[in-house]
Image (spheres, grey):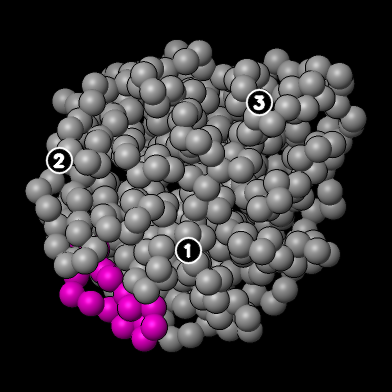
Amino acid sequence: MIRNSIGLAAGVALLSLAATTPGLATVANQGRPGGAARPAARAATAGSAPVAWVVNQSVRTAKKGSVTPIDTATNRVIKKIPVSRNAIAVALTPSGKTAYVALNALRPGGRGLVVPVSTSTYRVGKPIKIPNILPLNMLITRDGKTLYVGDWDSGTVTPIHTATNTAGRPIKTGPPPFAVAMAITPNGRTLYVVNSEPGTVTPISTATSTAGKNIKVGVTPGAIVITPDGKTAYVLNLARGAPGKGTVTPINTATNTTGKPIKAGTFPDASNLLVITPDGKTIYAVGNTAVTPINTATNTPRRAIRVAPRHGFDVVSAITPDGGTVYVGGPFGGTSRNGFIVPVSTATGAVGKAIITHGFPSAMAFTPGGKTLYVLCTGEPELGVPQDVVPVSTATNTAGKAINTGMQPAAIAISGSRSSPFEQAVQDGRVAARHVH
């Protein structure tokens, strides 16, 4: 089972680092779901600054989950928008008019929901029923017409027509656990879905919503990226249970056949550890403590770069929109309550000074220009470990004041950005689709 090293599945903690008890955000419209924004909230969104949409989980309490927009110009919470249950994923339409929030099923055998939220009025629309129990991955097509929802439990992908907000027939991809990652070709014609335990990738025609023959890759695949020219998909195989045997499998998208696996080292049990430069020349496979650059022209690995500080281990990665820096984050081991973010230059391979965070990094996303990296940190408030969103200046590589969004932050998407795994970067293949569970 692929899991984030810090996360939750259907409200059950997978590892002890999972955050539990939520705090409360201070916002202009707290407690007024679906209501009109107060003037302060309107002012926060009136400008051209992108908005970061963060979904938050309530884990061990009866409180509802929420989605929280953050004004990236001021790093202030605009509004806390309650939803009916645990929110576990978010995706924004290319127009930026709607944020779709995935909610997990309340009980085994139940059905998940996807709720549309207006980004201008913050009103929550009618929930869309889906057969998915754990809808942990969402991806919107470049034209914004279809939202694909992958279920980690049922072995299906459900298309949702955004014009009517109605769900289409589920597309079967394989036995669970499945849909740990998704990516779509730049021309929008084929959706690739990574199935974890079967060790396969399912190509789906977006024109007909039909699945092709499953492609066998490696052991425990956990991430996928596609080159900008759309010719090759790369799948990271974590090789769970076989330390040092991790590989990256190239797939020819014209024939859906695999090339020779590329050796890449040892990986943690996570699914957000593969990124690609915007020019498609290099992919970076992020292992337990090191990053391995791979030349896509020859499909050969270069020397691994040690990244994690002593006693730390990597669980999350992202690449700046200009491709100049890969950021890698994770927690320190033992009893430490801190985590780290480390910048790595793609030009020289030089590793910068670690940026220390309070709490454990679990997801990251850049603003459109790449000036700010937003890091979701999970924690344990009762033990003094905060669960916040931390803005990091990429110019100075310094962390700003933490932003409390209300509960455990689980996923993030930023308007106008193409660097968040939950949004349009997935379509370009620049960042592997990922999830928190």
Q: Is residue 376 magenta?
A: no
Nearer the observer, disc 3 or disc 1?
Answer: 3
**Where residue 11 appears, x then y in whole percent?**
56, 42
Secondary structure of residue under mark 3: strand
Along the line of sight, the residue nearer the viewer: 16 or 351: 351
**Where residue 190 appears, x then y in whole percent?**
51, 75
Q: Please state which amino acid type lies under the numbered disc 2.
A: Ile
Q: What residue is drawn where x is 26% and y is 55%?
A: 282
The residue labelled by disc 3 is: 71
Along the line of sight, the residue nearer the viewer: 131 or 188: 188
Q: Are marks 2 and 3 in contact (CB under 8 Å)?
A: no
Mark 2 neighbour density, 10 Å: few (under 14) some (14–19) many (20 or more):
some
The residue labelled by disc 2 is: 305
**Where residue 168 appears, x then y in whole percent?**
72, 73
CA distance separating discs 3 and 1: 28 Å
Disc number placed over residue 183 in the picture, else none: 1
Q: Which residues are magenta?
A: 245-262
Q: What residue is drawn where x is 77% and y is 59%?
A: 128
Mark 1 neighbour density, 10 Å: few (under 14) some (14–19) many (20 or more):
many
Q: Please state which amino acid type lies under the numbered disc 3.
A: Asp
Vertical position of residue 236 compared to residue 402: above or below: below
Disc number placed over residue 131 in the picture, else none: none
